[in-house]
Amino acid sequence: METNNDNSQRTWAMLCHLSALIVLLGIPFGNILGPFIVWLFMKNRYSLVDVLGRESMNFQIAMSLYITIAVILAFAFMPVLIGFLLFPVAGLLAVADIALTIVATVRASNNIPYRYPFIFRLIR
């Protein structure tokens, strides 16, 4: 049987991932700020939160960069019509961001750490 401390750690670990979705409420950079705030206040209390918070922030930073680059390139290459192909890429990246965030949240709810694919890890 799990202790209350295990339940709390798992809940905060889930919030490290789930808090990234506040960007959907229109909060600029909420996908990075949400995990950062949870990580900042709980990393010293729970080791799993420290690990998953860094992983979540790294993923959200990487996805934000990928989407921003795709949108900038789409506008830059708009006159050549290649730009129109990059808008769907940005959209697919946004959908992948949401889907992988949900996968990571579910994994954290099962107390299983999740490593996001295709990211660079700036925060170690």
Image (cartoon, rainbow, N blue to C red):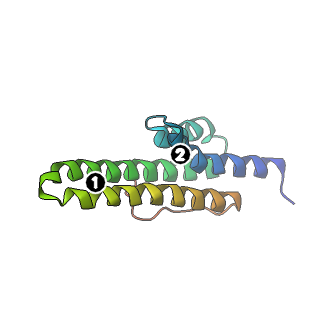
Dot 2 alpha-carbon crowd within 10 angstroms: few under 14, some 14 to 19, many 20 or more: many
Residue under the point 87% across and 60% down: 1
Residue type marked 2: Ala
Dot 1 alpha-carbon crowd within 10 angstroms: few under 14, some 14 to 19, many 20 or more: many
Q: Position of residue 99 (x, y in %)?
A: 53, 60
Q: Is residue 71 left or right of residue 79?
A: right
* Farthest residue, direction left: 80
Is residue 124 at all visible to an observer of this figure?
no
Q: Position of residue 13 (x, y in %)?
A: 64, 50
Residue under the point 33% across and 53% down: 66
Is residue 71 at all visible to an observer of this figure?
yes
Above or below, 74 against 39 in this view is: below
Residue under the point 27% across and 58% down: 86
For the residue pair 67 and 106, the one nearer the viewer reads as 67
* Farthest residue, direction right: 1
User: In the image, which disc is placed on residue 44?
Assistant: none
Q: Position of residue 73 (x, y in %)?
A: 21, 52
Residue type marked 1: Ala
Disc nearer the start of the sequence (2/1): 2
Where disc 2 sits, the SS reads: helix
For the residue pair 50 and 77, the one nearer the viewer reads as 77
Give the residue pinned by disc 1. Answer: 70
Residue under the point 40% across and 47% down: 61
Gap between marks 2 and 1, in whole Å? 20 Å
Q: Are the residues at dot 2 and dot 1 in contact (C-beta closer than 8 Å)?
A: no
Give the residue pinned by disc 2. Answer: 20
Q: Position of residue 67 (x, y in %)?
A: 34, 51
Q: Which tag is nearer the camera, tag 2 or tag 1?
A: 1
For the residue pair 82 and 10, the one nearer the viewer reads as 82
Q: Is residue 66 left or right of residue 20?
A: left
